[in-house]
Image (spheres, rainbow, N blue to C red):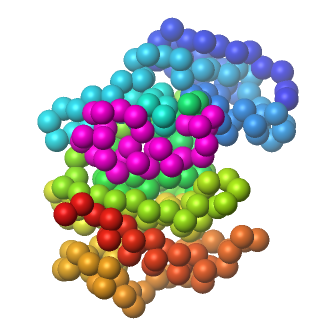
Amino acid sequence: MYEFRYVRPQSVAEAAAVLAANGDARLMSGGMTLLPTMKQRLAQASHLVHVGVLDELRQIARDGDTLVIGSATTHDAVANSDVVRTAIPVLAKLAGGIGDPQVRYMGTIGGSIANNDPAADYPAAVLGLGATVITDRREIAADDFFQGMFSTALEDGEIVLKVSFPVPRRAAYVKFPHPATGYAMSGVLVAETGSGVRVAVTGAGNGVFRWTQAEAALAGSMSAAALSGLPLDLARFAQDIHATREYRAQLCRVMAARAVGELPA
């Protein structure tokens, strides 16, 4: 690991000031991805600004038909929150299936979406539920936030403060996890929202994406049979030592059908 200065800010404003004054400073929330890559010298920072310690970023609250989760809220906190379980049960279930207990105790929703690992679970929830990412500068719709592998709409020094989820009528998430890591080899979130059906796929390609053909089919008939024979663009699917594009596409079909089957009545 390269040498760096550890900064424990007292506020978001202080964190933003450190970032503005030091071009090579990096934000850390839970550190589940950043710290291992720094240890391997695949990443470095002049200053490590630990926003995960800020209580102002750890709030969970429901405001009418909206659930707001602070960016430094851990996966474990989301999974075990009565507020989340009541408002959006699928979100609690998804968070409870991330990694292992050690990861869930330290990893955060803000860190996960800002990192935008193509096999992470939270991007499927943010995109599938049509959430809004709120930063210290602006609000970003989920459809505009994720921009491919490890890439988002965030600008240099921009800090994710919270994520605002509209409460759906019903939703379900099913993934096929890699047996060693727990990351999704294909995960699908299906949601009936106030603006229609949304289907988000993670783990199968170079980043989370919406399966628009499935959305149209399910809008007409919310049944697994409606997904039969729907086209999937294989170019959107990843191929590596773990699976071919064709295999991941088939997993996507199966996980989508299972998610529809798990939708609350």
Residue at coordinates 55% horizontally, 37% vertically from top-left? 104
**Was residue 91 drawn as part of the magenta stretch in this picture?**
yes
> Farthest bottom residue?
229
Q: Nearer the viewer, residue 91 or 132?
A: 91
Q: x, y percentage for residue 67? A: 26, 37
The answer to whether residue 59 is visible is yes
Task: Give the percent coordinates (x, y) of residue 130.
Answer: 31, 53
What is the count of numbered marks? 0
Read off the magenta span: 79-104
Q: Quadrant of the C terminus?
A: bottom left
Residue closest to the eye, 138 or 231: 231
**Which residue appears at 23% of the width and 75% of the height?**
222
Q: Looking at the image, is 150 positioned above or below residue 174? A: above
Q: Quadrant of residue 261?
A: bottom left
Q: Quadrant of residue 212?
A: bottom left
Q: Position of residue 160 (x, y in %)?
A: 45, 32
- Residue 86 magenta-highlighted: yes
| x and y percentages locating residue 262 in the rendered image | 33, 65
Q: Nearer the viewer, residue 167 or 212?
A: 167
Q: Quadrant of residue 246?
A: bottom right
Q: Is residue 81 above or below residue 51?
A: below
Q: Residue at x 50, y 63 (%)?
A: 175
Name the side, left or right, on which 107 lies relative to 33: left
Between 229 and 82, which is closer to the camera in this rendering?
A: 82
Magenta region's main secondary structure?
Answer: helix
